[in-house]
Amino acid sequence: MVNKITSVIIAIVAVVMLYMGGELLLLGGSAFYALMAAGLLITAILLFLNKRSALTFYALLMWITLFWIIWEVGFDKWQWIPRGDLFGVIGVWLALPFVVRPLYQGQRRFHPLLGSTVVIMVALVIGLCFYDPLPQQGTISNTRAPSASTGAGNDWSAYGGSTNGLRFSSLNQITKDNVKDLEVAWTYHTGDLRQGDDATEYTFEATPLKANGMLYFCTPHNEVHALDPETGAVKWKTTPDKNRSYLQQHQTCRGVSYYEESNAAAENSAAQPAMCRKRIFNATTDARLIAFDADTGKRCADFGQNGEVNLRDNMGEVRPHALMQTAAPLVAGNLVIVGGSVMDNGFNTGNPSGVIRAYDVITGRLVWNFDPANPENTAPVAADATYPQDTPVAWGTLSADLKNGLVYVPFGNASPDEVGIERDANSNTEKFRDALVALDLKTGAFKWRYQSSNHDLWDRDNPSQPSLVDITYKGNAQPAVILPTKTGNLFVLNRLTGEPVYPVEQVKVSTEGGVEGEKFAATQPVSSLNFIPQPLTEKSMWGITPFDQMSCRANFRELRYDGNPWTPSTEKGTLVFPGNIGVFNWGSVAIDPERQMLIATPVRLAYKYNLIKRTPETATQRTFTKDGQPYWNENFHGDYAIHIQQLASGLGIPCIAPPWGRMVGVDLKTGKTEWLRRVGTTKNLKTSFLPGRFPIGFPMGMVAHGGPLVTAGDVVFHGATADNFFRAYDSSTGELLWQTELTAGAQATPSTFMGKDGKQYVVIAAGGHGSLGTQAGDSVVAFRLK
């Protein structure tokens, strides 16, 4: 009776597999699943007829499957899962005594061929558990030497540690030898939690500052909290009204900025002294720049109007939620400088300007503005004038070279990001799209630009804060700026001239086959230092069963994909890899200037882009997703709306094989990647096939949204992964040294400082990320040695 039931189950599996495998075969895909389905069907028939040959036949199928798996993916255990798990389970079942015994009338309980096959393959799988072909073992052996490139010291007074944006600290009390002894010093709960009307992408991404004997950070609703750095006790906090709206595209605040007036500046200032000599600046999601007294939290009333500058000024009509500030403002000298963020693909025209504005840190007076549409005129705009709309925006954090008096602006795209039919190729707007721009710090005058993407039609913004570091590349010392990009390039440029330090090649890309009227750049820049993912093939598709892998394989075959990141978007659907989350995003990279080494966490995720034709009748029609949420890429009044979704199986699992997140160590003297490893596990993942979160931490390599921190103790600190863990690594080798599980996702960048108790602290925000689906929370957690 058992064998009859077993044969029926195998037959059902075979029929479903034959149907899906046949569809895949008709799309030009692998014939394996259709052939395997036929083999399963034969096995089921033989077993139903009580034939011993069923076991022999299935053993042969298992060997064929093994050789096919090795031919397709080698010995990557994670890619063995969808190809072999179901067939292996069936094999183990068929080899059990209660299946074998009836076929031999009780005379035998073990089938020699099938039994030995199962034993061998189980042993092989167990062996694979201890082998991973991905990690690249190596050591960065550069010795520590003094550097003119400055990071953070006892304090962490700027978003990236300093205006250089290195995410490096010279503190070395915590080392790779004692980091295992870290313990929680304190935990603070902000109380600012997402509620039903808040944006889906509600994220606690702040990097805390340590300055003025306090710890400062902002929450998603732009509350500013000041804590005692050693205890986490509240010194002061602001509680602005919360304008909760699910129409807000991003509800986040990545950091505040600190200014302290020097004694010399105070003596040389006007007769009227500043109301706050120490200030915290917060740029808000409703487009305001606010100055607070760093000691008390009260507004600095001499800044702008009652302590704030309205960043909607001179912007013309601004639609609700269309203009945002999500990055920390840049405080450089006596200026506070901001870019801005706009709603992606909301409207075809009428989007706010991407102007860069510099304000006096004391009065809030506009000192200069750099408008991409009018780059030559940086004098403050007239009070009744309006900046031209629909220009590229810089939504990431800016950097400054104070010694040479330069500001570095990572411009991204202009909305709409994925449709360029109406763009003017000769306009200033096009010239500054996806360009790193150097400006004079005092006047905003244009110095140079470097375009990281040509005629961007894929949302390839420059999202990361540029990092300024002096390097000796192949024996030649140069002042460099390093720009991480969504494509995966790391452009290493001379920061005084904009000329490439590392070679850059213009590669030919697809220019045909997009929607009517669209034009494509013939080439795209590729840096010699890049983490552009290897091209996908059908073999790259993944899943946890043969069925979702077949679905992913079929999806891959149906989509247009030219084997590079610049495949034209179409109405039928295009596979874009990497997708709009990018290889690098706002977390940027960390650089140890004393050892000339770079730590980065590149991401690998593929997305589907579908262009949806707009007509005069549908120009303003709003559409909604299956769960009733608004469709974000409407591009009202445009040629096409844009539908963007991750390339995932019906179970919500990425279709491409892991790792989806990695960590790398680069020797900047040579440009060589010395080590590479997976980061993050599957624990705490939100899945569609389980009621709760995934309970087991398989070390596949997970998406990391947030940046690393590197210290002179030769330690890399990193949260960001989708599993709620905070970890420490050896910066020389990438070896995992320590980890702890937090109560929520730490999609943020940590900071470190020296407490007045003489102990080094490391602190990180753990509040989760709405659109990534990580565990939500409201914690800031500090660690120190026992």
Image (cartoon, rainbow, N blue to C red):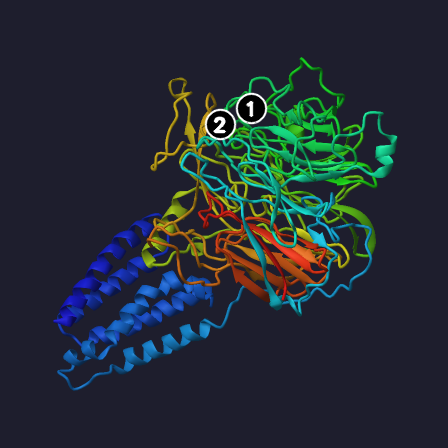
Q: Amino acid at mark 1?
A: Asn
Residue 672, quarter of the rendered image: bottom right
Q: Position of residue 492 (x, y in %)?
A: 72, 47
Q: Nearer the viewer, residue 127 or 10?
A: 127
- Residue 455 placement: quadrant: top right
Secondary structure at numbered mark 2: loop
Q: Is residue 475 above or below residue 375?
A: below
Crowding at dot 2, Cα within 10 Å, few <14 / some 14-19 / many 20+, comes out as many
**Outermost residue toward the bottom in this view:** 107
Frontmost residue, 278 versus 348 = 278
User: Taking 729 as reference, is 107 left or right?
Assistant: left
Q: Secondary structure at mark 1?
A: loop
- Could you tell me how far apart the alpha carbons at marks 1 and 2 are, in whole angstroms? 8 Å
Quarter of the figure that contains the C terminus: bottom right
**x 64%, y 16%: residue:** 386
Q: Which residue is mark 2?
A: 346
**Toward which corner of the image does residue 89 lie, by quadrant?**
bottom left
Using residue 83 as the reference point, say whether residue 300 is left or right of it. right
- Where does label 1 land, which residue? 351
Q: Earlier in the sequence, mark 1 or mark 2?
A: 2
Dot 1 and dot 2 residues touching (CB under 8 Å): yes
- Visible residue check, residue 28: no
